[in-house]
Amino acid sequence: MSNLDRCGVRALAAFSLAAISILCSTPAMGAPANPILVELFTSEGCSDCPPADAFLKALDTAQPIPGAQLIVLEEHVDYWDDQGWRDPFSSHALTLRQSQYVDRLHVKNGPYTPQMVVDGSEAFVGSDRPQAGRAFTKEVPVPKISVQISALHVEDGKVLAYLEVGAVPSKAEVFVAIALDHAESQVLRGENGGRQLQHVAVVERLDSVGKIKKGETFSKNVAIKIDHPEKDYRVIAFVQQADEGKVLGAAAAHAK
């Protein structure tokens, strides 16, 4: 077992007894899995982030929440890039996305890392496992609209797919995230200098592909450029209420 795998096991084991008791009240195994979008805002320049990154990986691998499919996204912000190490996965667009969450969710003390946002409706420290357990459990019974990804393939340096979304209960926006399935980096400087970090579902692009009016459905062929066609990617499609609101539905697929 690798050091990261051990860290992931410890991360899962670190759920408090209170959180475990909450999880036991979730629907029985075998029930249809409700998708829950888990966004982790992180940075390789932040020494507090690797434990949260490992926790996200453990959640992705173990899927420990009965009745839920945790769809994870690791979103690297750029406001640590002037602290000695430029995160090769950082994006100013993701920094702006986090800032919008901070404003809408009234997060005290502004943007920070690591920060986890669950289904666009709750934000907390990304390594806070008991809080994560409570947030996941709260979302398990919440009905979601159907999101389907089909005809997925890579061609000429692009990910091609067909999206279908069920009728939305309110005005919403459809997003597609293109994420590296796995990534790693040898950090040479900064707070994590000398460490080799590993990541999962690292967002490379996050595009809005359409808007939907209340009561409408949505379908569209999408083509999104990728930077490394030789690598394995995840495609995550999700529907979100306007202005980075509640996530109404999500789906994930692998593109190779």
Image: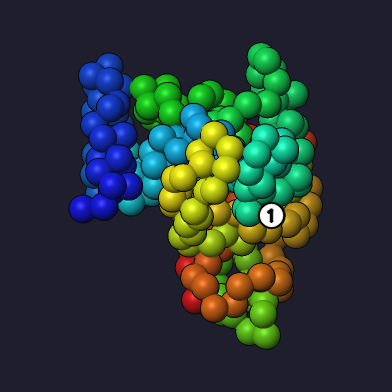
Residue nearest the observer in this picture, 151 or 96: 96
* Within-10-Å neighbours for mark 1: few <14, some 14–19, many 20+: some
Q: Position of residue 194 (x, y in %)?
A: 46, 45
Q: Residue at x 67, y 77 (%)?
A: 158
Q: Position of residue 70 (x, y in %)?
A: 42, 45
Residue nearest the observer in this picture, 227 or 124: 227
In the rendered image, which quarter is residue 135 located in?
A: top left
Q: Residue at x 43, y 50 (%)?
A: 196
Vertical arrangement, residue 113 with respect to residue 86, above or below: above
User: Is 141 displayed left or right of 124 in the figure?
Assistant: left
Residue nearest the observer in this picture, 248 or 227: 227
In this view of the protein, can residue 115 be seen by the observer? Answer: yes
User: Is 76 displayed left or right of 20 in the figure?
Assistant: right
In the rendered image, which quarter is residue 237 located in?
A: bottom right
Q: Residue at x 76, y 38 (%)?
A: 96
In this view of the protein, can residue 35 be seen by the observer? Answer: no
In the rendered image, which quarter is residue 44 located in?
A: top right
Vertical arrangement, residue 134 with respect to residue 49, above or below: above
Vertical arrangement, residue 152 with respect to residue 82, above or below: below
Q: Residue at x 78, y 52 (%)?
A: 211
User: Is 104 displayed left or right of 178 in the figure?
Assistant: right
Q: Position of residue 136 (x, y in %)?
A: 42, 32
Q: Position of residue 192 (x, y in %)?
A: 50, 39
Name the residue tied to disc 1. Answer: 206
Considering every residue shown, the one lying at the far left of the view is 1
Considering every residue shown, the one lying at the far top of the view is 108
Give the amino acid type for the residue marked by disc 1 in the picture: Leu
How many numbered badges does the structure rendering display? 1
Identify the image's colour scheme: rainbow, by chain, secondary structure or one colour: rainbow
**Callout 1: SS:** strand
